[in-house]
Amino acid sequence: MDRKPRRRTRERIIETSLRLFNDFGEPNVTTSVIADEMDISPGNLYYHFHNKDEILESIFRIFEREIEETLAAPTRRPADVEDIWLFLHLLFEQIWKYRFFYRDLNDLLTRNRVLEVHFQQILAHKVRTATTLCEALVSAGSMRAGSGELRALATNMACVATYWLSFEYARDPRGKLERGRIGRGVYQVMAMISPFLVGEAKNLLERLSQEYLRA
């Protein structure tokens, strides 16, 4: 049988760092901890990354590429309520995959200028996508909202999506942040849309929401 090629050390460092940052928080993980976890020497790690910020920025570039692709996907054609529900699940999956960025967001943006600038662009893209999705519902007659209401709603949707995991962590900082919490985040974002929906769109959202209302 052909053996799979061993992953390069640089890729392993990125994967291990992401797991440790997610599990323990980026401020609590040093390069020495990463090297120990991988059973490599600090010198081997520093050959690939001179410091932790270089590791952090490498992870962020991957995250940025993936989340920008996710944010662009639902705007390629008019979306209905079910499409938005699915899109939010995909978005929250990305947020969960790189959850340390969201849990430690304010601290990271204060310390790292690259992350500060690029995350501002991601936030702006979130608002644009939310606006486009809501405008599609209005055009289809599934939602009633004025332009000012749409702007506020899109901003609120982006805000809740961005800070949901921080909210969940603050509610139970000593508990385990479980994957199931992203489903509740999806529901909270959709709940903001609900008052503006009409007819079958509102009925569909209520049916989709049942499993979260029972939780």
Image (cartoon, rainbow, N blue to C red):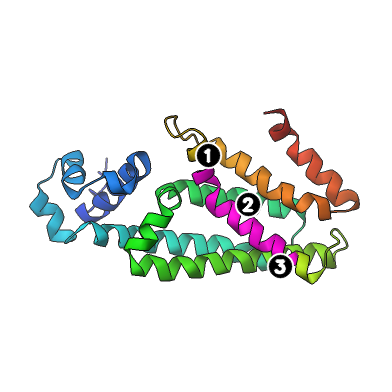
Q: Which label number is shown at residue 168? A: 1
> Can residue 77 be seen here?
no
Dot 2 amino acid type: Leu
The secondary element bearing badge 2 is classed as helix
Total marks in image: 3
The secondary element bearing badge 3 is classed as helix
Please identify the residue farthest to the right as the structure is shown.
199
Within-10-Å neighbours for mark 2: few <14, some 14–19, many 20+: many
Name the residue rendered at 52%, 35% in the picture.
171
Q: Distance between the residues labelled 1 and 3?
A: 26 Å
132 left or right of 119 in image: right
Judged by depth in the image, the label closer to the viewer, 2 or 1, is: 1
Provide residue 53's location: percent of width, then percent of height.
Answer: 26, 60
Highlighted magenta segment, given as a residue range: 150-168
Q: How far apart are marks 2 and 3 (CA)?
A: 18 Å
Pointer 3 residue:
151
Provide residue 144's location: percent of width, then percent of height.
Answer: 86, 61
**Which residue is at the front of the view, 22 or 65?**
22
Q: In which quarter of the image is residue 157?
A: bottom right
43 left or right of 157 in image: left
Pointer 2 residue:
88
- Quadrant where the C terminus sits is top right
